[in-house]
Amino acid sequence: MSGFVYGPVPSRRLGLSLGLSVVPPGACTLDCVYCQCGRTTCKTLTRRSFYPVEEILGQVRQTLKNTTAEFITFSGEGEPTLNLDIGRMVRRLKREFRIPVAAITNSTLLTDPQVRRDLYAADLVVPSLDAADQRNFARVNRGHRSLKVAEIIEGLVKFRRYYRGRMWLEIMLIKGRNDSVEHLMELRKATHRIRPDRVHLNTVVRPPAEKSARPLSEDELGQVQLLFGPGSEIASSSLHRTRRRFKGDPARAVTEMVRRRPSTEKDIEVSLGISRERLSAVLRSLVRSGAIKRVEFWGKVFFERA
């Protein structure tokens, strides 16, 4: 299959977002301990034209025939800027569909001037930065051996200098790994240099690649927010609560959603608009067939790709 277009999923931050996966699953520059997609199977810095641009655009056209979206978002199961054609796709999507385009990136390739230029056309860029020094970068992100976090921060600073869209910086905090006061102070300094429009503070709320990746408590996140000050907010794990009336094949829709990220039954119900009774039957059938699996994480039951 050439890429993958996820049906619109409600998001607290982006409204109804149509997700695009433009790299093969598991292709990434990092192997983060908290990744909800599991371990990285192809750690690389090499950019490639993975899929024909016209086929990706065709999938978007087909999906938007039957639904609407407030954003088209590059995300998926790997690092989207590894796709050499992402800049061309951003421009084509904006020109053809007149829908704002967002890119979620781990920031590592923003050291490359061409990648920075590719993302200048996006309406919103959501980069991440989980570490301010090489030691914490290794503990949390386990990056490609050539990556240096100091260079990544410089890439973010340069990108912000010329980028005219909105920029929301995401920081994922892992208990006992990158949450020391000393490191948080260094992260805050880096954030002040980057000057994003917002800082989203997050922690582990879905089953991670490594079971040892533990979340911060709400009180601990609140203390971190006080440290970062105005412009920072705690990213909520709850979905946008607008109900949708479901259309289409529920089994396929559920499978596509949990392929994108592990989700609770409530997440799926609210996101897709499938009635609770119907959804329970669909989930039982998909688990029995091996299409998806049921996992527990910190007292919650999630469904994820098998």
Image (cartoon, rainbow, N blue to C red):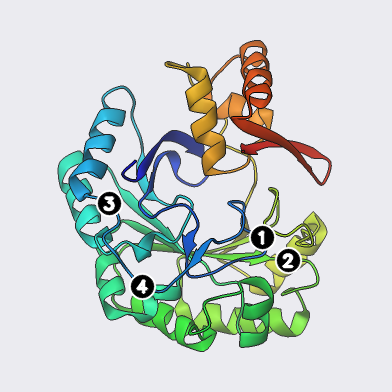
Q: Does the CB distance between marks 1 and 2 fall below 8 Å? A: yes
> In the image, is residue 2 above or below residue 270?
below
Q: Position of residue 290 (x, y in %)?
A: 63, 29
Q: Earlier in the sequence, mark 3 or mark 2?
A: 3
SS label for mark 2: loop
Q: Position of residue 237 (x, y in %)?
A: 65, 45
Please give the residue where the numbered disc 2 appears in the rendered image. Answer: 174
Crowd rating for badge 3 (residues with CA inside 10 Å; few <14, some 14–19, many 20+): some
Examine the image and state in which quarter residue 118 appears.
bottom left
Q: Real-space Cα distance between discs 2 and 4?
A: 28 Å
Q: Earlier in the sequence, mark 3 or mark 4?
A: 4
SS label for mark 3: loop
Crowd rating for badge 1 (residues with CA inside 10 Å; few <14, some 14–19, many 20+): many
> In the image, is residue 147 above or below residue 94?
below
The disc label shown at residue 51, or none: 3
Crowd rating for badge 4 (residues with CA inside 10 Å; few <14, some 14–19, many 20+): few
Q: Real-space Cα distance between discs 4 and 1?
A: 23 Å
Q: Real-space Cα distance between discs 3 and 4?
A: 15 Å
Nearer to us in this view, 131 or 35: 35
> In the image, is residue 143 above or below residue 287?
below
Nearer to us in this view, 98 or 304: 304
Examine the image and state in which quarter residue 294 appears.
top right
The disc label shown at residue 46, or none: 4
Nearer to us in this view, 149 or 50: 50
Nearer to us in this view, 52 or 100: 52
**Camera-nearest label, 4 or 1:** 4
Crowd rating for badge 2 (residues with CA inside 10 Å; few <14, some 14–19, many 20+): many
Specify the amino acid type for callout 2: Ile
Specify the amino acid type for callout 4: Thr
Q: Position of residue 7 (x, y in %)?
A: 41, 33
Specify the amino acid type for callout 1: Tyr
Q: Is 75 situated left or right of 276 in this image?
A: left
